[in-house]
Amino acid sequence: MCGIFGIVGIENKKENLLNGIKKLEYRGYDSSGIAFFNNDSIKIIKTVGEISALEKLLNEKNPGFNCGIAHTRWATHGKPCNKNAHPHFSKNKNFAIVHNGIIENFKELKARYLKNITLTSQTDSEIIVQLIEKSFTGNVLETLQKVCNEIKGSYAFCVLYKNEPDKIYVTRKDSPLILAHTKNNSFVASDVSAILPYTKEQFILKNMNYATLTSKELCFYDENLKPVSYDKVIINESTVETEKQNFTHFMLKEIYEIPTAIKQTLNAYPDISSVYNIIPKKIFKQTKHIKIIACGTAYHAGLIAKKVLEHYKIPISIDIEIASEFRYSEGIIKKNTLCIFISQSGETADTLESIKKCKKLGAKTVSITNVKNSSITYIADYNLYTVAGREIAVASTKAYNSQLALLYLLFSFFSKNVKEKFYEVKTEILNLFKNELLIETIEKQVKALLQKYKMVNSIYCIGRGFDYETSREASLKLKEITYTHCESYPAGELKHGTLSLIEKGVLVICFLTQTKIADKTLNALFEVKSRDAEVLLITNKENIEKNSYDEIIYLPFKNDLYLPIVSIIPIQILSYYMSLEKGINPDKPRNLAKAVTVE
């Protein structure tokens, strides 16, 4: 959510600022803008809509400058419009700010300190810059510290001060900021990807620390403004992952990258010692309870993981919690509980607050994330990484499949014969992707159905056991990418109310991969068909009665246990193509952001 990029150096920085925020487009935004020094003053140019609109304005004005900050905004306080877009000025235009996060007590701050100041926006962010100017002591760092001590909430912000045209001031709390320095240039961004084109050597700003950027150097300060030294972090990522290559959209590219993402994730853990070197063996031995906490797609991965643990017949109780609910719950943690937190970005606000809560309650914590050096990795006791590569499309695909693969592997460590189970899991999952044409084959099956289903208005996804949990993720994908009403239900629950909504014109997508309960699921399909609904069956079973479905997508795999890793792929692809038919950009669905860094 929202993106920050800033640069100070000796060259004209217009193109650099634009390219920086373009790298952050995937995070979601509705407006963009820049602030820069020009002729002894600060100038701001901003607009609603795509970055291309901002680029057009900049090309018309063609400003020259060597220090500036840029922002892409995802609306929280105040609707998307020019006045609410970042950056924001202080009253006398001595300061300009870009801000990520949410200031929870902005109304109280306004009432207490800014009664006589007319605000120009509806944002909480403007409160910060107005407060900086009103509280200014003559020293910017001291003023920032004073203001931050008043703020409740999360923030990462960059500040320009009129009288220091070669300097950017930055600070953060619970929202990431990355910094870097090369010859004659310094950079700040909310995501490593914006800085990667310039250098892989970066610095992760610590919580409640401050920094200044000039063309000559970076200077870091702790929360008491005492100078501190920082160690460089080498970001071993390729900028190729932020390019579409031969694909029209990132979403389809990332679906095609699922096999590679899973292989890379499993290969990152070549033997059991590679996991024990991260999570000590005694942690697995002493764990009596497991609590998985996550949001959205990551939460659905946790639901599958619960079924995996139960399938392994491991006598450990397990609960799956939605982070946004858990963080405000009573939060009872039993003795010897291991809390596992799943977050693709490692920056999910509710998940971060939940992990802090669990640590206070004495639990051991494990993070599963796709981003090294993300906020969650500095909080958790132990960190496991999916190696899916950077995911750009808002809808998670390859990261979800990789999370499943890693969770299957992780839970093998709770079994009696760890080594045997570990290698069994790796072999079975890799076998799913032996066919190099798997994604292409599924895509062909989906595209053959597209004209029939492209404009359907109501969808129900059903299944039992593992299939029900897969149906929940399928429902989310269809909602977020196609804007189609879609609900998920256990197949056996239709009679308890939902069957009243099943009628002609409704599409029912049924997952049928679990042999033990296949007949029970088929009974639900007969009920659906008798009410004239259209049925799409996704299955690995042969010889299914043809009068129980209308269309079928066949998955040629025999081992039911690992099917959730593959059975979601048809819906990932269907969602993508349905969005195109509706004229929707699948990479940037409305109102949604890639990294949910605020409540």
Image: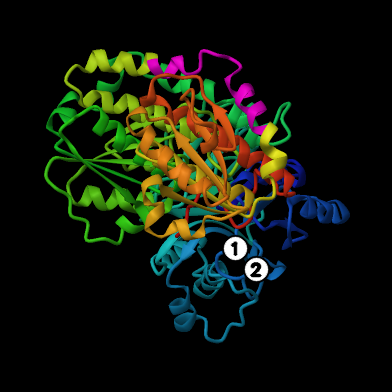
Q: Nearer the viewer, residue 388 or 507?
A: 507
Task: Identify the residue at horizontal 73%, vertical 57% (top origin).
Answer: 49
Location of the C terminus by quadrant is bottom left
Callout 2: SS:
helix
User: Which SS type dominates the magenta stretch?
Assistant: helix
Task: Identify the residue at horizontal 32%, vertical 13% (top origin).
Answer: 423
Mark 2 burial class by Cα count in 10 Å: few <14, some 14-19, many 20+: many
Q: Quadrant of residue 374?
A: top left
Q: Which mark is residue 75?
A: 1
Can residue 307 be seen from the camera position used here?
A: yes
Q: How many callouts does the rendering have? A: 2
Disc 1 and disc 2 in contact, CB within 8 angstroms: yes
* For residue 552, side relative to residue 309 (left or right): right
Task: Identify the residue at horizontal 49%, vertical 70% (top origin).
Answer: 137
Q: Quadrant of residue 590?
A: bottom right
How far is mark 1 from mark 2, CA to CA? 8 Å
Question: In the displayed image of the protein, which residue is found farthest to the right?
Answer: 60
Type of amino acid at the residue the image marks with label 1: Ala
